[in-house]
Image (spheres, helix red, strand yellow):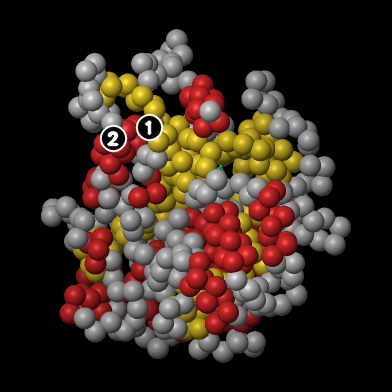
Amino acid sequence: THPPLQLPADPDLSLVPHIFSRLPLHHHSQPHSSPCLLDAATAASLSRADLRRLVSSLAHGLRRTHRIRAGAVVLLILPNSIVFPVPFLAVLAAGGIATTMNPSSSRAEIADRLRETCPSLVLASRDNAAKLPPSAAPVVLVPETFPSADDEFAPFRALLDSDVTATDEFPSAEVGQDSAAAVLYSSGTSGRSKGVVLTHRNLIAMVELFVRFEALQYATPACDNVYLAALPMFHVYGLSLFAVGLLSLGSTVVVMSRFDVGEAVRAIHRYKVTHLPLVPPIMAALLRAKSAGALSLDSLVQVSSGAAPLSGRLIQDFFQAFPHVDLIQGYGMTESTAVGTRGFNTSKHKKYSSVGLLAPNTHAKIIDLETGFCLPPGSCGDLWLHGPAIMKGYLNDEDTCTRNDGWLRTGDLAYFDSDGYLYIVGRLKDTIKYKGFQIAPADLEAVLVQHPDIVDVAVTSAEDEEAGEIPVAFVVRKPGSTLTCEQLMEYVAKQVSPYKKVRKVIFVEAIPKSAAGKVLRRLLKEFVHLDGAA
Ligand code: 4UW
């Protein structure tokens, strides 16, 4: 494992001043005016000086106009853009708590989130504002680029119109390292998806331990690196890198509003992208594009994969297509502020199927599923994590099953080798991972049981070549019902984000349950597997 790092001790420190206090470090090699966020399609950009000024003035505006203070929640429903980090960081700089949401969320999902987090303000794209219920919190429309002259963005412009002094002082926001900073959603190890409360300390630790540490791997200074942001910033993986961590390194982040393989290839070429964080399905799409045409992506130095298992086959295909590019895997969770392990290739160790070494200051145990005892290297068990990036807890629900004395039970089946490299072998928890996005089976079950023709239901996953996994519903219909699989899938699709759709329905006589009434999900999974093979 890596040697420990000194983390900032000042209890009054908060994330945003910390990030910006890091930036002057790069003055000597790059001017403050070089772009830190760049739009892949239009080449519109924000410099670090712009970012600092915008975050600071928006933070003042949020305090003045919407009374955002310590404890106030602001809901962000925004697609990726060069603007995204500005409202996220400004809410934190104002002292508030940002909660992010998939911009493809349904009306019902948005209504649920409003009920659960009671935001004082919603910052939304135009499309998403249209999905809000009429009596929701005040809404301000956020543009996808600066400047934006349209009238509908006038309230946003007014928030930016603060009298910030020449030094761009952030408001003094009565928050410190222990204060809540963000609530990101995760399905945990079981049940409905829930809010993960992350503190300023968690985010500061993420910046220091994960992002800065990784930058030490390469000889070039991090401020020369150009990252392609093809992953969404509402999820912990994209958020931690593109809206927080990389800004503190002074790297350039080229933002795609959504992933498209042709545009990604053009952007890599046009902006000389060096670093490409991906999920396995995006890597597969890139490899397909590469084999279809002679793309030269010579600028690439590193591709990193995370959020879902990367198959040996993909690793092999990757090196065939990109022999000159380094490949690492990373492992993290929403509950650990994305911190966990990071691939670390040396001349001695090139363990591409491993998710890498533990981040500095982060500890792990492998727990035997039967005995509850710690297991030695080489043995497989439930991975537990401990460290400064582990969440404070779940919103409105201190889930004691998941946290024991500060240890986070990941619900991932894993082992360490004798060199300290971690391998993820499987998942013990119910979560379904569709293209790297989490789906809680219980969320889909809650939608399905509302159908008048359904008596009982259980959702599990099936393996899928393209998406990794897809949700499958086992359904018991009312006697005499003529409900079809297609009708049921359409019923769900109308109520959930597209990635959460049920993609297969199996009608059964009864759902297998234990004597205690618990759904026997393992049995269902085996059945799906056999059904798929048949
Ligand atoms: N291999 C197999 C992996 C892997 C994995 C995660 O949606 P969440 O809560 O969070 C994430 C975070 C991903 C992430 C990965 C690498 C990285 O560097 C980074 O930060 C920049 C973030 O996906 O889902 C967490 C669950 O996703 C699975 C695993 O089951 C974990 O509990 N998972 N990474 N490399 N499975």
The location of residue 382, given as percent across then percent down, is 63, 33
Category of crowding for the residue at label 2, using alpha-carbon neighbours closer than 10 angstroms: few (below 14), some (14–19), many (at least 20)? some
Element type at mark 1: strand
Q: Quadrant of residue 24?
A: bottom right
Which of the 4 image quadrants contains residue 172?
A: bottom left
Q: In the image, is 359 to the left or to the right of 154?
A: right
**Residue 482, x across and y down, in percent:** 23, 25
As drawn, the residue found furthest toward the top would be 515
Cβ atoms at labels 2 and 1 below 8 Å apart = yes
Q: Which of 37 and 97 is in front in this view?
A: 37
User: Which dot marks residue 488?
Assistant: 2
Quadrant of residue 300 within the rendered picture: bottom right
Q: Residue 10, can we see it?
A: no
Residue in the picture at 20% in, 27% down: 452
Q: Which mark, residue 505? A: 1
Q: Dot 2: what SS?
A: helix
Question: Residue 20 at what x, y percent from top left?
Answer: 51, 75
Residue at horizontal 48 percent and vertical 55 percent from the top? 236
Vertical relation: 20 (above or below) 389: below
Tell which circle, 2 or 1, labels the residue nearer the N-terminal end: 2
Q: Where is residue 501 in the image (x, y as percent from the top left)?
A: 36, 43
Task: Specify whether 267 is left or right of 79.
Answer: right
Question: Of the residues shown, which amino acid type is indicated by label 1?
Answer: Val
Tell whether 304 sits left or right of 469. right
